[in-house]
Amino acid sequence: MTQRVAVRKTYKLFIGGVFPRSESGRTYVVTDAQGRFLANAALASRKDARDAVAAARKAFAGWSGTTAYNRGQVLYRVAELLEGRRAQFVEEVAASEGCPPEQARQQVEASIDRWVWYAGWTDKLAQVLGSTNPVAGPYFDFSLPEPTGVVAVLAPEDSSLLGLVSVLAPVLATGATAVVLASPTRPLPAVTLAEVLATSDVPAGVVNVLTGRPAEVAPWLASHLDVNALDLTGASPELAVQLEVAAAQSLKRVRRPGSEDFSADPGLGRMLAVLETKTVWHPIGV
Amino acid sequence: MTVPAREPAGVPVPMNLITGSGPDIDVERITSSPAALRAFLHGLPGVDQVGADARAAALSTRSIKTTAKSAAIDLAISMIDLTTLEGMDTPGKVRAMCAKAARPDPRDAGVPPVAAVCVYSDLVAVAVDALAGSGVRVASVATAFPSGRASLGVKLTDTADAVAAGAGEVDMVIDRGAFLSGRYLDVFDEISAIRTACGPAHLKVILETGELRTYDNVRRASWLAMLAGADFIKTSTGKVSPAATLPVTLVMLQAVRDFRDATGRQVGVKPAGGIRTTKDAIRYLVLVNETVGQDWLDPAWFRLGASSLLNDLLMQRSKLTTGHYSGPDYVTVD
């Protein structure tokens, strides 16, 4: 009886709704927590980052223009698909993070719950974060939260799925589009999430997933004039400083890295970080 | 190279197209009758379609980087015919485009102006006014652009209007219906008449290659236009898909090269429509360099008909000078 030879997978990037190889043609080996081969992943280059930003920019008008209710439905549908792939995610999280299956299962369930939680926020943001403002004049003055544009996200290195969902879902809930740099050492849950998004109703380009070295790719995203906000959650302290300096050139919104507890109540902070406030003065009583 | 398939009696077949030697082209004799012109055009060597596609594809894999890329971007900018040909064009839009044509990047005086702006004939006067003293030429489409479906009288008036308003270049469309049904002499006579009506203005002849179907037709139409006095041959109106493609431009470049060898007169080439990225533009420059050489790498002899291409060139230029990627928020919306 011959033993079956396992298929060694080489994953690709997720840009503009399709799965291209890295423009550079490079790949790297992804191992599990014990150093055993898991798969090959694409090693993104700066041009992949550029293409991802272009795709995210193209998708922004459509995604931010859909009604908040519809956006919530689309995101909820993603949660349904995640639920269907639970077993695969549990296996990948367990292998990537080297944790027991039971713990991995909890992580995956928390991730799906978090996605649902953020999906529910899409049509409530304006009520909670918007306001009518008392002003000393004959004006009806109100403020509304608006999506900022293209957000570059450095996903946390350790928490391969819950961390990823916790940084990606708030960006999507606000109506912004995302370029995500997955955890360099634990990218497989991000790749699978990309496969889920590709088969969901999320329009092409709204989420773009790059795998590779943050130190190589992130500076190009930070200095890119067409990126509106930068989430540095997954950046090392030295890299974060460098990226923040680069981002200052184009006055990006920057969310600095800090100690994160992804199991805690996320609050509105991550959504606030990528929202603009539009205030309107409307004449009354004339 | 292939020998012409048919060699009709009484018409000198231009063997010198290929070899650069042989009898000169005698336009009067070639156009003495519909049959003679047909015999000449059908006597042109056939285009190896697979070969042309492969050649264009091979050349488009050339990698142009750093200083060469920087030079290519500036050259491409200086070759652009910045175009707006919409029913909703207004004098204001044309003036805005002219300002951009003369000074593509307001923050950087080092960016060369484009070669020309291309507008409908009723907006020529606005463009001429806006570009006075800038060195940017004004081109006008004419002859019932883009379909070309009007009587010769209307086409001549259209052309005369554009020239009278100050257009230095006229982009005419050929009658594709006549060409495809084999009435080559009608097409020839029409181009000749427009040529005369243009007076001192340069005449660009739009072949609308997307409607000509075969590369053989593209070669014949190129020769027909050049024999009739075209200063430029242009691929497309931009209103028909496919517009300019690399293989079609290759065939046209071969035609102008062979025409110069045969007659000594140099004719320019203008691909137009569908050229949107810097990468595309550089591919065309490589094609020119490899097919007809340095002689044509000049705004006087090669143009790129485009509108959104300029923004991409400016963004790429900014990437090269500043070291970081630019975005569409930093160039004009058009």
Image (spheres, grey):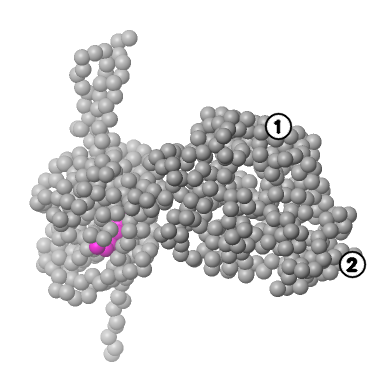
The crowding category of the residue bearing disc 1, from other C-alpha atoms within 10 Å (few below 14, some 14 to 19, many at least 20), is some
Is A209 included in the stretch rendered in magenta?
A: yes
Which residue corresponds to the image point at 55% horizontal and 31% vertical from the top-left?
A: B130
Q: Residue at x 68, y 61 (%)?
A: B257
Secondary element type, mark 2: loop
Residue most toward the top?
A286
**Residue name at image x 74 percent, y 34 percent:** B160
Give the labeled residue for mark 1: B164
What crowding class fits label 2: few (fewer than 14 Cα within 10 Å), some (14-19), or many (20 or more)? few
State if disc 1 and disc 2 touch (CB < 8 Å): no
Which kind of residue does numbered mark 2 sit on?
Ala
Task: Looking at the image, tell me whether mark 2 or mark 1 is earlier in sequence order.
Answer: 2
Where B330 sits versus A157, above or below? above
Q: Position of residue A88 (x, y in %)?
A: 24, 65
Image quadrant where one finds the N terminus of chain A: bottom left
Classify A77 as above or below B105. Answer: below
- Residue farthest to the right, as pictured: B10
Query: Disc 2 marks which residue?
Result: B9
Instruction: State left or right for residue A165 relative to residue B212.
Output: left
The magenta segment? A207-213
Residue B201 in the image: x percent, y percent? 70, 41
Q: Residue at x 27, y 30 (%)?
A: A278
Residue B127: quadrant of the picture = top right
Choose mark 2 or mark 1, whichever is in front: 1
Does B209 appear in magenta?
Answer: no
Q: Chain of mark 1?
A: B
Q: Is residue B7 left or right of residue A160?
A: right
Residue A199 in view in this figure: no
